[in-house]
Image: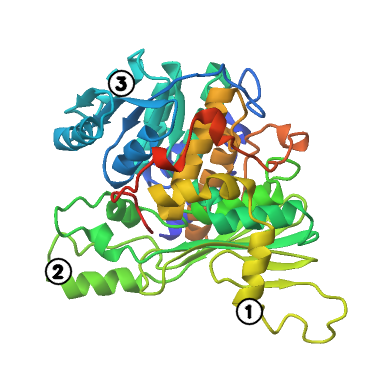
């Protein structure tokens, strides 16, 4: 392990490597921990504010039809002006199930692709889709998105969209070169509380921002081991990787609040991990000595990452998928005007007349509810009841899909772009390097190549449901939507 840690002491930006250090990258790649130190040419034009030609009818091909993919098919089918024209999965039975659902609900029959690991290429090459909606396992995210963009399709990718810095760079440069959208499907940015948080920040209620606290806490032990059918792709990844491999649910909302990539950017991070005691306990309790599942896990039970931005702001990111504790996907923001937390329902705003222990007594639920109502985001005011009827993490999934479709149909920039994708996903490799190298300081690449200095922050976006022909009667409750 000491030799491995020593080999990980290198720059995070592959563009800064000299040709003479190529052997270092080869060793690191062989260890499964980092990207190869290869150079890449700059893109042709920035994707900040990029607007694609309007799509009156958005034809979507969904790749990966498991729990997330099936929910996506159902939501997208209910969005006016969107048609699921293609379905793709390695497993024919998954394709058959979604084909049947669309047929049973009166939708046009899609084209289907199944049976092999590269069958997605046929979907991407087909001229019957405009958008490839990628819900496959992590390691397939970037390869499928890259192929889609090179086939002249917009790529929308479940989280995390990229697993290495090389993949981050390649997605950025391919999006720039092909002039196709490449967006990470970060649904947490569209939760009701997160959008209240954004309203508070944009209104200046929280003053000058100083620190963000976010994380993903979700005991996935049974899911990862999956003793029912043995599909353990996520556990297999955890066995080989350290650091925070799932940072985006908490981090991307904080990025929007702090205008990361739009006036500020990530500078560096440090990470540390706890022992793997919970992973080891579970395997001792469920598998006898010598069982193939009794193998070491590199992933800490808890990974803590501290990020510093160029302007001096700090962010704490927590990752824990093995400890028995309450589920929490959260973001909390602090500034000179006070504090707001999306998950713990804790709020305190600065009161100059309240001397001494002004922050010790939290607001009661009634007062918080009044604040939330006052600063409810326009998206939730207008389409919140429709989204909650459909479902999907409380409705946030439907609002995300609805907003994407609205932008594509009306020639608007997307709320998140490929630079947001790259900056958030860079945490995977950088945090792993830091954990394996004694909490080393790891520098973020500037995927925008200076564009962050002039890019405009995300505003308060809206949707006109009448323009889309969307009504609450036009959607239905869907039992297959995820709830956690």
Q: Earlier in the sequence, mark 1 or mark 3?
A: 3
Outermost residue, top side: 127
Separation of marks 2 and 1 at Cα, in angstroms? 47 Å
Dot 2 crowding, Cα within 10 Å, few <14, some 14–19, many 20+ = few
Q: For residue 269, what is the image quadrant?
A: bottom right
Residue at 67% of width from left, 28% of height from top? 49
- Between circles 2 and 3, the one closer to the viewer is 3
Q: Is residue 469 left or right of residue 363?
A: left
**473 relative to 413, above or below:** below
Of the pair 253 and 440, the residue shown nearer to us: 253
Q: Is residue 211 left or right of residue 65?
A: right
* Contact (Cβ within 8 Å) of mark 2 with mark 3: no
**358 relative to 180, above or below:** below
Residue at 66% of width from left, 74% of height from top? 367
Of the pair 204 and 425, the residue shown nearer to us: 204
* Contact (Cβ within 8 Å) of mark 1 with mark 3: no
Of the pair 47 and 481, the residue shown nearer to us: 481
- Between circles 1 and 3, the one closer to the viewer is 1
Q: Earlier in the sequence, mark 2 or mark 3?
A: 3
Badge 2 marks a residue whose secondary structure is: loop
- Between circles 2 and 1, the one closer to the viewer is 1
Separation of marks 2 and 3 at Cα, in angstroms? 41 Å
Q: Which residue is mark 1?
A: 364
Q: Can you give x and y, in whole percent of width and height, for residue 380 in the image? A: 57, 50
Q: Which residue is mark 2?
A: 287
């Amino acid at each position: 392990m000491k030799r491995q840690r020593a080999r990980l002491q290198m720059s995070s930006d592959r563009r800064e490597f000299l040709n003479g250090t190529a052997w270092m990258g080869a060793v690191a790649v062989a260890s499964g921990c980092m990207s190869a130190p290869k150079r890449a040419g700059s893109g042709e034009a920035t994707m900040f504010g990029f607007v694609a030609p309007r799509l009156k009818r958005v034809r979507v091909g969904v790749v990966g039809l498991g729990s997330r993919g099936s929910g996506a098919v159902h939501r997208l089918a209910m969005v006016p002006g969107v048609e699921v024209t293609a379905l793709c999965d390695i497993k024919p039975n998954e394709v058959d199930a979604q084909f049947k659902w669309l047929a049973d609900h009166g939708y046009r029959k899609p084209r289907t692709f199944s049976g092999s690991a590269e069958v997605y290429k046929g979907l991407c090459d087909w001229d019957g889709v405009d958008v490839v909606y990628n819900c496959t396992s992590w390691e397939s995210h970037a390869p499928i998105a890259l192929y889609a963009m090179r086939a002249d399709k917009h790529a929308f990718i479940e989280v995390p969209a990229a697993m290495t810095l090389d993949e981050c760079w390649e997605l950025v440069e391919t999006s720039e070169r092909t002039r196709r959208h490449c967006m990470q499907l970060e649904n947490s940015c569209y939760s009701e509380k997160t959008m209240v948080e954004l309203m508070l920040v944009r209104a200046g209620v929280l003053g000058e921002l100083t620190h963000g606290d976010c994380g993903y806490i979700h005991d996935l032990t049974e899911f990862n081991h999956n003793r029912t059918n043995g599909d353990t792709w996520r556990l297999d990844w955890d066995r080989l990787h350290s650091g925070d491999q799932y940072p985006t649910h908490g981090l991307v909302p904080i990025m929007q609040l702090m205008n990361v990539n739009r006036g500020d950017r990530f500078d560096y991070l440090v990470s540390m991990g706890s022992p793997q005691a919970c992973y080891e306990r579970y395997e001792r309790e469920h598998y006898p000595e010598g069982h193939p599942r009794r193998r070491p896990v590199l992933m800490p039970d808890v990974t803590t990452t501290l990020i510093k931005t160029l302007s001096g702001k700090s962010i704490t990111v927590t990752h824990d998928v093995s400890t028995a504790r309450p589920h929490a996907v959260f973001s909390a923001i602090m500034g000179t005007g006070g504090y707001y937390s999306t998950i713990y329902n804790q709020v305190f705003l600065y009161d100059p007349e309240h001397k001494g222990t002004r922050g010790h007594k939290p607001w009661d639920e009634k007062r918080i509810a009044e604040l939330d109502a006052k600063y409810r985001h326009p998206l939730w005011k207008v389409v919140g009841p429709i989204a909650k009827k459909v479902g999907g993490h409380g409705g946030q999934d439907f609002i995300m899909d609805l907003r994407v479709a609205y932008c594509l149909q009306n020639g608007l920039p997307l709320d998140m772009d490929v630079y947001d994708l790259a900056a958030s996903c860079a945490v995977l490799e950088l945090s792993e390097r830091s954990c394996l190298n004694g909490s080393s300081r790891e520098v973020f690449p500037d995927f925008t190549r200076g564009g962050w200095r002039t890019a405009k922050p995300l505003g308060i976006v809206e949707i006109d449901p009448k323009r889309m022909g969307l009504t609450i009667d036009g959607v239905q409750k869907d039992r297959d939507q995820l709830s956690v």
